[in-house]
Amino acid sequence: MDTPTLQEIELKLVVLGLTGEAALHKLRRSPSLARRQPLQQWLDNRYFDTPDGLLQQHRCALRLRQTRSSAAPSAAGDWVQTFKTAGHNQGGLSQRGEWETALGTASLDRAALQGTAWDALDPADQWFARLQLRFQTRCLRTTWQVRRRDGTHIEVALDAGHVLAQGQEADFVELELELRQGPAQALFELAAELAARLPCLPSNRSKAERGQALWADRLYEPVKASKPLPQPGQPLALLATRAIADMLDQFLRNLDNLMHHDAPELIHQARVGWRRWRSLQQLLRPWWPALPDLAPLRPLLDALGQQRNLDVACTQTLPAWAASWSGDASAWHDSLERLQNEQARHRHHLRACLAQPATGLLMLELAHQLWTLNQQPPLVKKREAVQRLARWHRRLHRLLHNDGQVLADVASLHQARLLAKRLRYGSEALADALSAKKQRRLSLWLGEAQAWQTRIGEARDAWQAGQCLQALGAADAVVYFFKGIGAAMDRSAQERAMQSP
């Protein structure tokens, strides 16, 4: 049976805050699509895996797909079996192996996998015998064929539907640009045109990954920092690009999730991803190309910061100090209610900022730059990178000690906290590329940076709660209660700074 091998190259975008119909309306007005006749089909995808998820662990996917002209599901008709292997995913652009075979029934066919990467994964057919249906996706796919005069051919597909697993269902709207012929650069150029009208973000999350996450009840779980596994002899530049890709992915995945879920940790992890990314970019500035203007992202970053302040005040600061409040109980409850109402109101504002085309355009530009750097990584010098970290470390000490004077206020301590974060994230990113001796030195800096980040953060959280309450018109007694706590913790942090070596 013929099973052609393909190298799939596609750029995926997740559409934010729009239904499939609204997204389609906006796309039809894009110059590259306006005069092209789209094709609409219904897709029924069935994904299989072993009970212990061996395919998922190896980042592979095996599915059956039926394409229909109507929405009604049917077991009859033609099906296509597709096997995809682990590939390279970065900034929404993915490259992976793919094998497809047309079938006459909705049953998996082992013979169609012969001569593919499956043979190495499952030489004794032990996995295949244990395969079972894990989840399904159903969607309306609208496709356009974009052909340029230079021979470039890109298929644009808008998928609007839902994923089903374990009796649960979740909607999705995605845009996929698959390169049929031509340079990968063309994907980014066309994506920028479409993103100018459509609120979206680059995404490395496949439908299979969404289904697996729904199956495990982790679809909108906060995404924490991951550490790319070190590869012996890997140049520092490649380690840096991998780390930056991971940081950007953490930021984008949490942004995507917070459009669907209210968990405060999503806000926190999105900000952590951005801080990590900014810290490494600043560390690598002498060797890295200039960044695009980040000003279009400022409204979103400010909204994330304000949402984080409200989340911390509602879920951490006020609950932690409730037992210490001896004043009017009604004033305390009124203050908490004001914070909670503002927390919910501001979340709508945050999502509105995120669903602006300018946000997606900038993230696409950053993803494009990262892809370009992967083609030709810059030369990053380890010794000079460590020297830059050392200068950050000395600057942190000078800021904390302030030439023998106690720091003036919370704002100064907050500046020290930001520098401590930068030192921490930069040290974490480069540690695996350095000698054991340098790693020990970085470990000391990392421990010190983490300790100061925590101490100063506690003082700022209390002070920030007082600021939020004052802006919301809460009782003066509660406002000054928290400002007093912040001042006391501020003073404690200052004294520790003076006592530290």
Image (spheres, rainbow, N blue to C red):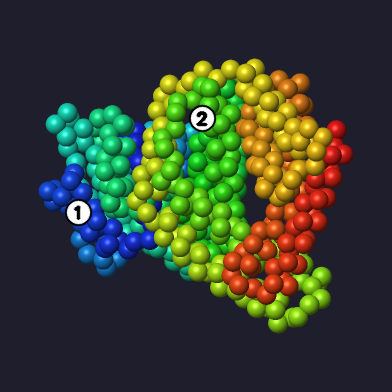
Cα separation between marks 2 and 1 = 36 Å
Residue 266 appears anywhere in the view: no
Q: How many marks?
A: 2
Label 2, secondary structure: give it.
helix
Q: Which mark is residue 28?
A: 1
Split into 4 quadrants, where in the image is the N terminus? top left
Q: Nearer the viewer, residue 374 or 51?
A: 374
Label 1, secondary structure: give it.
loop
Residue 306 at x, y percent in the picture = 56, 58
Structural crowding at the residue carrying mark 2, measured as other residues with C-alpha within 10 Å and reported as few (<14), some (14–19) or many (≥20)? some
Compared with residue 54, is residue 484 higher up or lower down, i.e. above or below?
Answer: below
Split into 4 quadrants, where in the image is the C terminus? top right
Which residue corresponds to the image point at 77% horizontal and 48% vertical from the top-left?
A: 455
Q: Amino acid at mark 2?
A: Thr
Compared with residue 2, is residue 473 higher up or lower down, i.e. above or below?
Answer: below
Q: Nearer the viewer, residue 172 or 430?
A: 430
Which residue corresponds to the image point at 63% horizontal and 67% vertical from the top-left?
A: 470
Residue 298 at x, y percent in the picture = 46, 48
Q: Amino acid at mark 1?
A: Arg
Residue 259 at x, y percent in the picture = 46, 60
Q: In the visual, does 71 lie left or right of 206?
A: left
Compared with residue 268, is residue 180 higher up or lower down, i.e. above or below?
Answer: above
Residue named by callout 2 = 241
State which quadrant residue 117 falls in.
top left
Residue 449 at x, y percent in the picture = 73, 38
